[in-house]
Image (cartoon, helix red, strand yellow):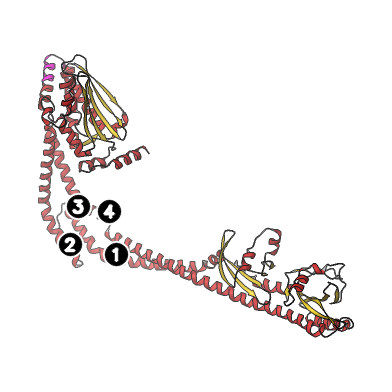
Amino acid sequence: MLWRVAFQIQNGAYKRVKNKYFGYLEKITHRGIQSTIMLTFSVISISLMLILGLVLEARFSVVYRGETVRSAQKLMEQTGESLEDYLIAMRQVSDAAYYNAIKEYDISGEIQDIQKSLNLLYEANKENLRSIALYDHYGSLITAEPVAAQKEDPNVTQQGWFVRAMEEVENMHFSTPHIQNLFHDATYRYYWVISLSRMVELTNGGDSVQGVLLVDMDFSGISRLMKKINDANSGEYYYLCDSSGEIIFHPRQTQLADGIGRENNRIAAAYKDGVYGEVFDGENRKVLVSTVSYTGWKLVGVLPEEMFAYGMVNLRYFLVMMLLLMAMMLVVLNRIVSVRISRPILKLNESVLEYEAGEKPGIYIGGSQEIRHLGYSIQKSYEQIEELMKTIVWEQNERRKSELDALQSQINPHFLYNALDSITWMIEDGQNDGAAYMVTQLARFFRLSLSRGYTVICVRDELQHAQTYMNIQKVRCKDSFTVRQEIEPEVEDYCAAKLILQPLLENAINYGVSGMDDGEITIIAKMDGDNVLLAVKDNGIGIPEEEAQLLLTDNNRVHKHGSGVGLVNVNQRIQLLFGKAYGLSIESEPDEGTVVSIRLPAIPFTEENRRRLENGYVFSREETRGKEESDEG
């Protein structure tokens, strides 16, 4: 059996050495250097192109936004000039009516002359005018052009244009659009107008009195100007409001009036001239504001964010096509470069693979200086590999043999002798089934003792080893004691040191229940908070308190009849593996029995944790709890 184990160890050592020195060759076989170089260049090239594309897109987006805003500002500037020209013409009509007609005549006797002058003025500007009317300070109509009958009790003095003219006598006042509602129209048509009102001084019988001159401008002129700049279908729109935010013109005025849509006109009216960014109804947009002279009106342009995105679509298509063309060119270039670089390396690899297959050809030496040097180095290294492998295999075999010898030396020869002696007398006595059972348990005992050379095993294996040991001892001692187990299944998958229960059980048999007819030994495995608790309990004669305190410090006290490992040895091994916070504790009372407990950290048994523990890593309490909580989750 030992020579078979040694052969397996030697074979495993050879494979590890081979994997260590030739692993990189297998990687080259699975992924060639040519594809690696090409992939690397392609990733770098594509990354650079994407970065370039994003930078260009961002730069073009900024330029496009700026140009769009400047174009909108220029359009608003032209529209504002047209509105100002229109309003100046109306002011000139008002000035002409006041200074050339009203101030030149007395209303008490020269009303016909005033009427004639106003008629000439109306006829000259009737394309943009709806009416010219003169009222005294009581709101009574003095004259109007064109001649028309005033509606009954229009209550002029309560209307906004009249009130503002009388309150602010030095200014001209423009109203918001409204339906002309002062005079009857024979055609029963109603016109939208903007009223220009001002206070005037009237001469009445030589006395100076106050009155109000009203010029109703046709709103269609302003409407045509605003509709013209709102013809674009790219998403932007323009509207006109007064200084308080009242809408004068809006392309969606009907929807606003019906409550279907909303506009941020009150806030826009408070803006100074300029460009502003705002969020309205969850939409990002640019707002351009320009003030119309003489009136305080605000011409507002709204550029939604979607308009900028829509305008960038064609530019993005161009960038994508350009990047695709560059990508195709770079693929071809990468292919050429990767072939030039990788060809000597691939030839070197082919010669190495042939050498590895046993053909032993000459190692390829060519290409650049670095690759030629690599070829020379590989050729020399192959000449040394065989000797190196033999040396390493020999060292590994010796190391494994030493470990195996150390494990086997832990088993008490006295125990082995007694077990074999028991098998012998059972055979001689004809108890073949019992002898076969003993041989099976003994074989299982040694197999578990070896544990593939591991120092750290799971609690389940340690409990099985303890059970096998007790099965053998019960046969040897002719069932002079009973064995109970109190095992919580959840503890079986945690880490434990190998061969820590056997010394405790051996001491319980030899010093606890020896010579008793009703001896009982209990094996306990359970969770104790964040720790794993293993214990061996007997109902034997017990140990005096002062002697129990010395068992874990006086190594000589545990070597009289035990396994040779001893309680001190077990305690030291546990503390070396898991830290000083863990190990053995003894509770005993004379004539009551003894409980020897082993406290271990709750470290889940995995191959990684086993290797870390055997390599000397000590888990902290925080790491232990974290691993346990992760396990439960």
Q: Residues within 10 Å of mark 3 (few under 14, many from 20)?
A: few
Residue range highlighted in magenta: 421-431
Is residue 459 found inside the magenta-colored segment of the image?
no
Identity, as a three-letter code, of the amino acid under mark 3: Phe
Q: Quadrant of residue 402?
A: top left
Q: Is residue 126 visible?
A: no
**Which badge, 2 or 3, is on the more N-terminal residue?**
3
Residue 30, label in figure: 4
Mark 1 vs mark 2: in front: 2
Residue position for label 3: 22
Residue position for label 1: 338
Determine whether 559 is above or below 154 in the image: above
Q: What residue is shown at x 30% (from left), y 42% (from top)?
A: 622
Q: Which residue is outermost to the right?
A: 109
- Magenta stretch: dominant SS? helix
Kindly state the secondary structure of the residue where label 2 is placed.
helix
**Which badge, 2 or 4, is on the more N-terminal residue?**
4
**Which badge, 3 or 1, is on the more N-terminal residue?**
3
Q: CA distance from mark 4 to mark 1?
A: 17 Å
Kindly state the secondary structure of the residue where label 4 is placed.
helix
Identity, as a three-letter code, of the amino acid under mark 4: His
Residues at circles 3 and 1 in contact by the CB criterion of under 8 Å: no
Residues at circles 4 and 1 in contact by the CB criterion of under 8 Å: no
Please name whichever residue, 99 or 329, is drawn nearer the observer in this view of the structure: 99
Q: CA distance from mark 4 to mark 3?
A: 13 Å
Q: What residue is shown at x 29% (from left), y 67% (from top)?
A: 337
x then y, percent, for residue 338: 29, 64
Residue 374, label in figure: 2
Is residue 425 found inside the magenta-colored segment of the image?
yes
Please name whichever residue, 319 or 82, is drawn nearer the observer in this view of the structure: 82
**Which badge, 1 or 2, is on the more N-terminal residue?**
1
Q: What residue is shown at x 16% (from left), y 39% (from top)?
A: 8
